[in-house]
Image (tube, helix red, strand yellow):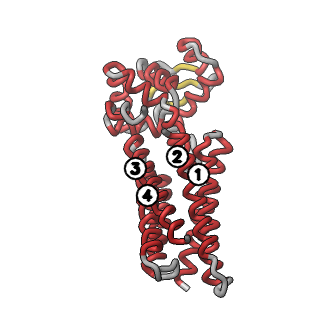
């Protein structure tokens, strides 16, 4: 059950990433590129969680992806305000 | 569908429109101001373009805040087209050019409802004044 | 230790994004901002539950609750993206 939900979240994050890429293409605002990359990293993290049965959120390769995702968002916000 | 119209406009023009322009009236106001070196008050611009005075003043202040207009505060606040950088001047020239050659594409891009939502989303992450 | 710090950062970043989006929603009433701000609230809850599962209630399995929170968060975002920008 949990694996199924994690797979659904992974798919949802991947689709959200595609929307953000489209917004970036329309507006050329790099903030959307940051969000797209972040959500694709979240999609990857959730894919790992659902596919690898012994994977949990407190293993390095899972939380490193989350850290990278949210650092990407923070970087995007920082870069937007730097301009 | 919004996806097809932006393809006709160059990326730098789309980026300029996304960051500096919110409505068709703002496009027309900017191009009107670009057409003359004269300092104009909000009242003058409103009557020339047949817009409400308050709305015109807001648009002029917004464009000035974005570095597109020069403001002179006196008895009456007046405005003149004076981009703060060469790049901004180039984008305005590009807008003027495409307004003539592909007006539908420009208006379609600016008017797209989805673009407004996207712009609001991006503006949410401006930590200072969202109007800048 | 590092994992808990990471998820704490994720909670704070998600909450930060939620606040910014809600602030702009109050100004513009754009519904995408409404749904996306609640989505980031959902992400904050999801990360808080991971932190709680790891640090606060290590003997309790919160994996289902965490997963549902994540699903809720992404669903809210997709709803806003699809209805407000298509």
Return the residue at label 4: A14
Return the residue at label 2: C81
Mark 3 or mark 4: which comes first in sequence? 4
| Residue C36: mark in rendering | 1
- How far is the residue under mark 1 from the one under mark 2? 8 Å
Dot 3: within a 10 Å radius of its alpha carbon, few (fewer than 14), some, or many (20 or more) residues? many
* Tag 1 subunit: C
- How far is the residue under mark 1 from the one under mark 4? 16 Å
Secondary-structure class at tag 1:
helix
Q: Residue at x 62, y 42 (%)?
A: C31
Q: Residue at x 57, y 80 (%)?
A: C4
Above or below, B57 against C56 in this view is above
- Left or right: C73 in relation to A40: right
Secondary-structure class at tag 4:
helix
Dot 1 and dot 2 residues touching (CB under 8 Å): yes
- Tell me residue B30's x, y (percent): 46, 25
Secondary-structure class at tag 2:
helix
- How far is the residue under mark 2 from the one under mark 4? 13 Å
| Residue A21: mark in rendering | 3
């Amino acid at each position: 059950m949990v694996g199924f939900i994690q797979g659904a979240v992974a798919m949802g994050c991947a689709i959200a990433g595609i929307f953000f890429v489209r917004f970036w293409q329309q507006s050329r605002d790099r903030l959307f590129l940051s969000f797209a990359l972040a959500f694709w990293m979240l999609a990857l993290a959730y894919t790992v969680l659902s596919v690898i049965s012994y994977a949990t959120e407190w293993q390095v390769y899972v939380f490193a992806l989350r850290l990278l995702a949210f650092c990407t968002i923070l970087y995007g916000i920082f870069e937007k305000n730097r301009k | 569908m919004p996806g097809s119209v932006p393809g006709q406009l160059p990326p730098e023009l789309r980026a300029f429109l996304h960051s500096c322009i919110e409505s068709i009236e703002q496009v027309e106001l900017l191009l009107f101001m670009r057409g003359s070196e004269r300092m104009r008050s909000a009242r003058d611009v409103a009557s020339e373009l047949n817009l409400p005075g308050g709305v015109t003043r807001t648009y002029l202040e917004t464009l000035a805040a974005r570095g597109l207009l020069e403001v002179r505060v006196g008895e009456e606040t007046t405005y003149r087209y004076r981009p703060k950088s060469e790049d901004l001047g180039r984008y305005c020239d590009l807008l003027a050019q495409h307004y003539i050659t592909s007006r539908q594409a420009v208006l379609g891009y600016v008017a797209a409802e989805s673009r407004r939502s996207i712009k609001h989303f991006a503006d949410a992450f401006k930590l200072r004044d969202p109007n800048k | 230790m590092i994992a808990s710090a990471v998820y704490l950062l994720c909670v704070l970043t998600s909450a930060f994004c939620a606040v910014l989006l809600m602030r702009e929603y109050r100004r513009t009433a754009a519904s995408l901002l409404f749904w996306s701000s609640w989505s980031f609230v959902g992400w904050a809850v999801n990360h808080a539950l991971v932190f709680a599962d790891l640090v606060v209630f290590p003997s309790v399995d919160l994996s289902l609750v965490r997963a549902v929170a994540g699903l809720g968060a992404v669903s809210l975002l997709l709803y806003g993206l699809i209805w407000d920008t298509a």
